[in-house]
Image (cartoon, rainbow, N blue to C red):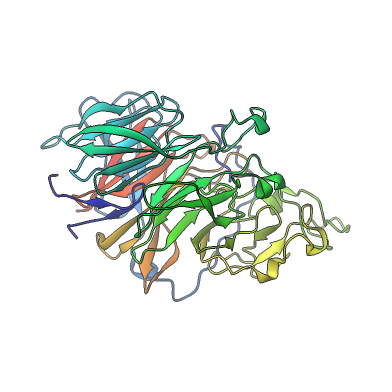
Amino acid sequence: MKTVVRVVVAGGLTLVLAACSSDQPAAAPADSASRAPVQPSSAPASADVPALVATTVRPLAGTGAAPFDQNRSVQAPPGWTVTVWARVPSARLLAWTPDGRLLVSRPKSGDVVELVPSPGDAAPVQRTLVSGLNQPHGLAFAGSTLYVAESDKVNAFTYAAGAVSGKRVVIDGLPDAKSPELGGAYAHALKSVAVGRDGALYVSVGSTGNVSAEDRDATPERASVLRAPAGGGTPTVFARGVRNGTGLAVDPGGAVWTAVNNRDNTEYPYDRDYDGDGDPDEGRVLQGYVNDHPFEPLARLTQGRDLGWPYCNPDPDLQPGDKDSPLSYTRRPFVRDVANNPGGTKLDCAALPPVEQGMGAHSAPLGLSFATSPGLAGEYGPGALVGIHGSWNRNPPRPPEVSFFAWRDGTLGPQQTLLTGFQQENGSRWGRPVMAVQGPDRALYVSDDFAGAIYRVTAS
């Protein structure tokens, strides 16, 4: 574990070695099954990836408290092992230090925890690296500089050998629940941070609520990804219409990507009968439609890009508006939001570039990272890792998982499930992954804020 890594984003690694998420319980399953997504026949690597198999989750010594006081299993690639490596209550985003220690943010506790790998089959040594912070969430390194995104600012620290010093504020005045104009109401206060190849800082600023169009006119603009110069300074809008881009990372080519929690309770946007009762359903909130609309974007950002919220929604329907339409999440266009963009006068949805990739509606993607060459073991290779927290308002509930998107020819392929099985048949859960990062040993490390755990996932 002594190999040095260079971390370029919160958990996005360049290895020297080769919806809104909620703490509310999942809804009980309905009798109707979700429509299966259709992906292009050229989906990278997916045809060669073996089916997942039941894998026992093995606690290391000292990590076996509930929910691991009884046998737990997940679905994982054949031959892969899953261990409970550490217990960290309310563990959120992850980043590796330059000297091979894993950092874990804990917004609820106001601190960042350091995990120092131990030799052999032992749990890591755990201690608090920095405390007294205001909902710390995003973590990113640029050389020996550690950036920590609090709810209202981004701090920089000088990191060396398990210690931080020289705390300084590099981006200030970010909105949170204490902002006077918000009156204590802010649904998405947690911030994520990434460092671009040129050292510029990127910060995700979530929306005030499910639908709050005033965010687009706020200063600083909410529901956006902001960009500040290298080393910090006054940020400007890099991308807008990003409802809650908690996942934020830089790809191997240097582009910034975000995984977005999209809106809830979207009205049916077509003047036709969707539910079969003989009456047109335009403008109605229909559970069958809400279950799969809008999907959660995984988008490559460029200066000035608009992801549409709350005026345009990415549409997974290959046959738009058809109740039985096959679904796809690859290069999908936008459809107008019938409640917030009547007549399409607020924003021309047809003019927005298609979304590169995505996940099913209400997946609640959180942490995003890139595993670079050679990437994951077997047929997976390099790609993006997304922690799927699972739905709170879908029926049947969308299960939590760790997803993988293969990196091929400068872009991402369709979603592949890498780890799942955290949800019971009745919709209850014993775990909810937040983020997955590849370590300097090429193992995967997965945070779970529901179980209060860090998993170590290795291939045979």
Q: Position of residue 190 (x, y in %)?
A: 50, 37
Q: Position of residue 269 (x, y in %)?
A: 77, 59
User: Is 6 placed left or right of 450 in the picture?
Assistant: left
Q: Residue at x 34, y 60 (%)?
A: 197
User: Is 372 placed left or right of 404 in the picture?
Assistant: left
Q: Position of residue 358 (x, y in %)?
A: 52, 59
- The answer to whether any part of residue 3 appears in the image is yes
Q: Residue at x 52, y 63 (%)?
A: 303
Q: Nearer the viewer, residue 126 or 77?
A: 126
User: Is 68 placed left or right of 190 in the picture?
Assistant: left
Q: Residue at x 33, y 48 (%)?
A: 11
Count how many numbered circles sit on residues in the image: 0
Q: Residue at x 48, y 42 (%)?
A: 389
In the rendered image, the quadrant that contains the N terminus is top left
Q: Position of residue 242 (x, y in %)?
A: 58, 52
Q: Residue furthest right?
A: 279
Q: Residue furthest front?
A: 233
Q: Is residue 353 above or below residue 236?
A: below
Q: Is residue 281 above or below residue 131?
A: below
Q: Quadrant of residue 446?
A: top left
Q: Quadrant of residue 456?
A: top left
Q: Nearer the viewer, residue 244 or 233?
A: 233
- The answer to whether any part of residue 63 appears in the image is no
